[in-house]
Amino acid sequence: MNWAIAILQTVLFVALAPLLAGFLKFCKCRLQNRRAPSFLQPYRDLLKLTRKQPVISEDASWLFCVAPYIIFTMMVLAATVIPLIAVDMPTSESADVIVLVGFFAFARFFLALAGLDIGTAFGGMGSSREMTISSLAEPAMLIAVFTITMTASNTDLSGAILHILHSGSTLHPSFVFALFALILVAVAETGRIPVDNPTTHLELTMIHEAMILEYSGRHLALIEWASQLKLMLYGVLIANLFFPWGIAQSFSFGALSFALVVLVLKLVVLSIFLALAETAVAKMRLFRVQEYLGFAYLLGLLGMLSHIILESTR
Amino acid sequence: MILTLAYGAILLSLASAVFALLQTRFNALVFLFLGLSGAFAIAAGIGELLDQTVLIDKIPLGLPWQAWHVRFDGLSAFFFLIIGIAVFVVSFYAPNYTRNEQKDTQSFAVLSLFTGLFISGMMLVLLADDAFMFMIAWELMSVASYFLVAFQHENSANRRAAFLYLLMAEVGALLIILAFGVVASSSDGFTFDALRASEISTTWMSIAFGLALMGFGMKAGLVPIHVWLPEAHPVAPSHISALMSGVMLKVALYGLIRFCFDLLPEVHWQWGVVLLVVGTLSALSGILYAMMQQNLKRLLAYSSVENIGIIVMVLGLSMIFLANNHKELAALGLVAALFHAFNHALFKNLLFLGAGMIHHQTHELNIDKLGGLIKRMPETSLLFLIGCMSISSLPLFNGFVSEWLAFQTALQVDVLDNGVLRSMIPVSAAALALTAALAAACFVKVFGLIFLGVPRSRHAEKAKEIDSFSMMIAPVILATLCFFFGIFPSVILDLLSGVTSHIIDATLPKTSVLTPLWLAPVSMQQASYSPLLILISVLITALVLFAFLHGKGTTKARIAPTWDCGFGALSPRMQYTSNSFTMPLRRIFVTVFLIDEKVEKTMRENTKLNVADVRYSLHIQEHCWVHVYQPIERGVNRIAKQVGRIQTGNIRTYISYSLATLILLLWVVSL
């Protein structure tokens, strides 16, 4: 039974990810006075891509073809770790938050290698930038999450969420720092404005798009879906870790469906905020990103120190 | 029985050295003995780790009135196992590799002689139970490896690197002797048992710790005394660099652990802080410098500095917990450090052997002149990829498990009372996270530029896969082990509990779970990791995905030229190079490096816009060369010049010096 719900939750994660991307696009369009495509447009795009014949560069190796599968698999595994509608899943015990960061690193490793595989300048540029940004973002993310896990003295996400639920509505100053740090990291890691712009193409500013320029057909579909999934993963991580209220603690049908409704509301609020931010803020220069991520790192560190100084049990 | 196996391992490696010297026609025997030596060492190591009784013996060697004391316990056995695996694997790899490296029969004899001596020296260090034997074995290891570094001595740069290595090894050895001396001065003898029982004051103990840290740190490659490492590793033959980086650095760590955790009567948290800071510094600067290298072996050498830094950092954590009476957490730290040492030995050996294979086939180690090897050397590339994934600590591989354990150790900081420590350890954990992320970036660069893309030189284009089975089997074994211990880390972690109980008299917390399925270092409630379950879910997901996308009616992919934006043919020179790949990080961490970047433009016909030719050069130097070593060098030269003044070259002056000395001595005697 538990396993069935765990698998259901993962499937839900994977299935809902394009919807979130569609909703985000809808919000952005409305904010910019444009007519929005249907929420379902990302699904149609994915379907179209899977039907198309992929074209592979003659310089590409097997790694180029395998990478999309690895990237997608790693994102699915990450989805098994983050509690979506219920805590205490059997799958979430097999990996904690450090392993979650490891999954992201695994996917990124292969994405960057795939970018280098065809031997074009764009691919190398994307890989170099992606690895630079992620090597600054990853420690910022870990330190922000460590603040939570140290409070809960538990690096399992399920356990941490349960601890926060049970400790009631005490205000932790450290959580505020960690929350902002994690939001900054999430924006950078999912390639949103102001760090990267997912809608640009063939410009010298692109990062994520530069790496996947040579992909087409089902390979591109997998990568697109994986990056939508990554956006959703970060969204759910932030929503459920800092605002866990509503998440199902028992596996009854009522609790689960209530949790789903609450989750959708949380994600709607989050994506409206993200759309607002993306509309209001301009993309920054590549070499300003280190200041941005340095700030995220600093926030994470401040959160951790305020946990140690102000909140620690001793 | 176990001790006999250990002696057998040493004798066999000596036999291989002797056979090489005899220059018989049976060169294969040399490697057979080496392989057997490795196998014996593995057997001895595993046997002792399972048995867990401390074995003590005396060998009537050395000084006439002082037999060598031998002791074989869990810690020695664990490092014996590391040496055993490396030697065993190298014995498969070396025959073919040396055949191409050697110029004549004599050079083969020299190489194999010193390899044998070097290996037996390392094994003897692990067995030593008194300071005499320890130092003799240590010197055997250092001097033999000097000759290995100087193997290709025709090149003056190689001679320089070898001399630097010898100099630092000897200074380090002096410091270690001093450290032993300080402890021995308040105990009755030089046996380790006597040292353990010494009643030494805290101040002297701290001095001994400092000396030992510098001495062993010089060998292990801690910043800023690591400078010999990136010079010596690239010039030695690849399987020797594998042994030096994978194993010899570990022997230095063994010395540090033995001295600090075992021989010194107690540990202080301040020392732990020193280890933590030095380790963090080494890890960060090691990986940042590694990133900037173009020479593959130099890059790997710097990455060893990084990994040694991580190990020392975790040792520091362990020491802090030990000094604060959290013995179980100290055991966790020690286990994490030792496991990382083990893993590093595996994947660094693998990468060095891979570098040797690349060099063997392309005669090129410059990353910027390689590329596209994944199609030309498919098996090598897969093995190298596994090495890169392990060292980048990606899940499912062994490097991840030890780094995960290190994080778990650091996150236990809440049990400490000291506020400074409580806020310092998380900062170092964040530095560890940065190191791991940078390592991933570094090895994306390594694998991406060497194996992917289009060949950047003719050598790379003409490369072929290694055709020797025995040369291929060595990295295959290592890669399999990297994956195996990534999925079943409990195999080694179980063995390690014996080590910690010998050294610090504690094992992992009782609530910890170490089964083939679950890994929970503190308790199931706190953190758990199950690589096997993850592997199963990866397989299931991949299978579903494949079935979903490759059902009926899927079209086969079309192969087409790369899209060149319509501007005409792409050339290999358009690809990113090592320098361009790391340019953003170089710009971000600009203060870490001393950068000398030059762009020279030649203009066509005195116009300012028409560039005919551009020359770009980039030279990156370490701060410590300019700010530490060069002042020392200048100081030594200046003192030497001052001393030189009394040497007039006039014989009458020297006679008067002798007379003055004689009178002085007579006066001293008469007092």
Image (cartoon, coloured by chain):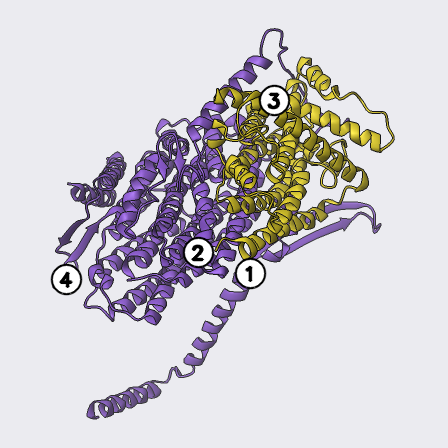
Query: What's the residue type where badge 4 is placed?
Result: Gln
Residue B369 makes an appearance in the image:
yes
- Asked if the residues shown at circle 2 and circle 1 are in contact, with their CB atoms under 8 angstroms apart, the answer is no
Neighbor class of circle 3 (other Cα within 10 Å; few <14, some 14-19, many 20+) is some
- Residue depth check, mark 2 versus mark 1: number of the one nearer the observer: 2
Residue occupying the point 62% across, 51% down? A173
Give the SS element for disc 2: loop
Name the residue that disc number 4 marks. B66
Of all chains, the one bearing label 4 is: B
Of all chains, the one bearing label 2 is: B
Of all chains, the one bearing label 1 is: B
Name which of mark 1 and mark 4 comes first in the sequence. 4
Check if mark 4 and mark 3 are on a common chain. Answer: no
Q: Quadrant of residue A194?
A: top right
Of all chains, the one bearing label 3 is: A
Neighbor class of circle 4 (other Cα within 10 Å; few <14, some 14-19, many 20+) is some
- Measured as percent of width and height from the top left, residue B297 is found at 47, 44
Real-space CA distance between mark 3 and mark 2, rounded to the nearest whole angstrom: 42 Å
Residue closer to the observer: A6 or A246: A246
Name the residue that disc number 3 marks. A12
Neighbor class of circle 2 (other Cα within 10 Å; few <14, some 14-19, many 20+) is some
Name the residue that disc number 2 marks. B416
Real-space CA distance between mark 1 and mark 4, rounded to the nearest whole angstrom: 46 Å
- Asked if the residues shown at circle 1 and circle 3 are in contact, with their CB atoms under 8 angstroms apart, the answer is no
Real-space CA distance between mark 4 and mark 2, rounded to the nearest whole angstrom: 45 Å
Query: What's the residue type where badge 3 is placed?
Result: Leu
Shade representing chain B: purple
Residue closer to the observer: B35 or B604: B35
